[in-house]
Image (spheres, helix red, strand yellow):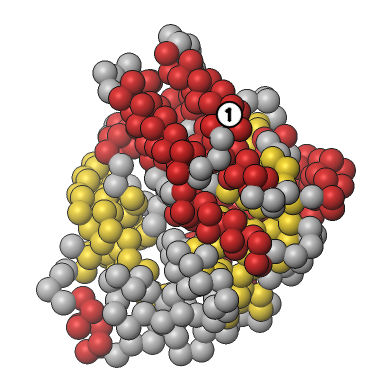
Amino acid sequence: MRVFKFGGASVKSASAVKNVGEVLRTQSEGPLVVIISAMGKITNKLEKLMDAYFHNKDDKRILYKEILNFHSEIIKDLKIAENDYYEVENLLIELECKIEKKRDETSSYDVEYDRIVPFGELISTKIVSTYLNKIGYKNRWIDARNFVITTNKNRAANVIWEESVPLINSSLKPLVERQTIVTQGFIGRGLNHKNTTLGREGSDYTASIFAYALDAESVTIWKDVDGVMNADPRKFENAVLIEKLSYNEAIELAYYGASVIHPKTIQPLKNKGIPLYVKSFVDPAKPGTVVLENESRTLNETQCYIVKENQSMITIASKDFSFIVEDNLEIIFNAFNTAGIQLNLMQNSAISFMASFNEDELKANYLSEILIEKFNVSLAKGHTLLTIFNYNKTNSEMEEIIGQRNVVLEQKSNSALQLLLI
Ligand code: ASP
């Protein structure tokens, strides 16, 4: 039994969907679960639609039309009788009804988000599943929400393994043995029976949830790049492919923000020793990257560069000159948690705490509001966080990398050097 995951880029157009058909036809053998994300950048569009709906903005209908037209074009270009897509049509109608209905004023932004944004995955899997059946690749569409049972934390739900694993085993496994299953990444159902999502890019995590529960032989994430690179080739001209990574290295790379694999994906696979392949859907014959070693280091001399642009930097200083130790740190971390902000780098001195996180004006303002009573808070935008993993550089090499920029925060661990630059 194997698990394949196709992200948004692999289903961004009719020709991309046809290519998925080709990859499946040539690369799949034996029982298979196929996890698919929303098409192209539709999740971003749905987030905008959600925002317009929630704040009753004028562009709500325009955004809906764009989503409708995008999917209709793909269906048309796939040249399959439009009647076959009545279920997709139903989903689009359901989405329209949702945004037209008056919003329940007591419902929070995050709850509404999880009602609307999952439509991207539901629609894309219906289109791909229908297309595959039409070209003779028999498969069965399954609603992932019936199997991925999560905490009720909207937009960042955690899987509840004790609930999900038995369900997948008892109800899904027999189906996978009979026929390829096509299902959605990213979405789940909370214990309160309402929709949840696993966080942006969460479909990789879905793949590893199913793989863990099914004791899969392997997981393959199909990408538009050859595999995991040691740097973004658009930013570093000497970027090279990493052929093999240990689970620990992959976890650390994902933690530092390498966008190839969602951070939560590796641990379940590591626990069961399930190999993860990252391969190119453009050229499936290429070997790609495999993550499987339990030993701690396979990278040897290869250093990895992870760049996170658009970082906010916050400085939090106690008003009463009390030290930033346990009690103040508790308040500060609680505030980050309440504001829903993930820290990318943090450092503290006697009376101040500094951190960087992805820019998000709403969340940053909310964080300041929480902290302002007890602390002096200052916020600055436009920073870049550079992480060099497996760090082994001379000073002059570092000077070249940093160039004209200033280092405002610096942190070094056994495995990584992190610099916040402006
Ligand atoms: N569609 C979701 C996103 O764009 C989940 C995923 O693609 O993994 O974040």
Residue 45's image quarter? top left
Q: Is residue 189 above or below residue 405?
A: above
Task: State left or right for residue 387 relative to residue 4.
Answer: left
Task: State left or right for residue 8 relative to residue 402.
Answer: right
Q: Is residue 204 above or below residue 141?
A: below
Q: Label 1 neighbourhood size at 10 Å, few (<14), some (14-19), many (20+)?
A: few
| Label 1 CB less than 8 angstroms from ligand 1 | no
Q: Locate residue 298, reporting x and y percent.
A: 57, 84
Q: Looking at the image, which is closer to me, 6 or 296? A: 6
Quadrant of the rendering where the N terminus is positioned: bottom right
Quadrant of the rendering where the C terminus is positioned: bottom left
Q: Locate residue 2, reporting x and y percent.
A: 73, 61
Q: Is residue 3 above or below residue 379?
A: below
Residue 239's image quarter? bottom left
The residue that disc 1 covers is 83
Residue 34 appearing in the image: yes
Q: Which residue is at 25% across, 87% downward?
A: 397
Q: Locate residue 352, reporting x and y percent.
A: 29, 53
Q: Which residue is at 28% across, 23% downward?
A: 59
| SS at badge 1 | helix
Q: Is residue 120 above or below residue 210?
A: above
Residue 339 appearing in the image: no
Q: Which residue is at 79% across, 58% downward?
A: 31
Residue 163's image quarter? top right
Q: Which residue is at 35% across, 31% downward?
A: 66
User: Which residue in the rendered view is the most extreme toward the left?
Assistant: 404
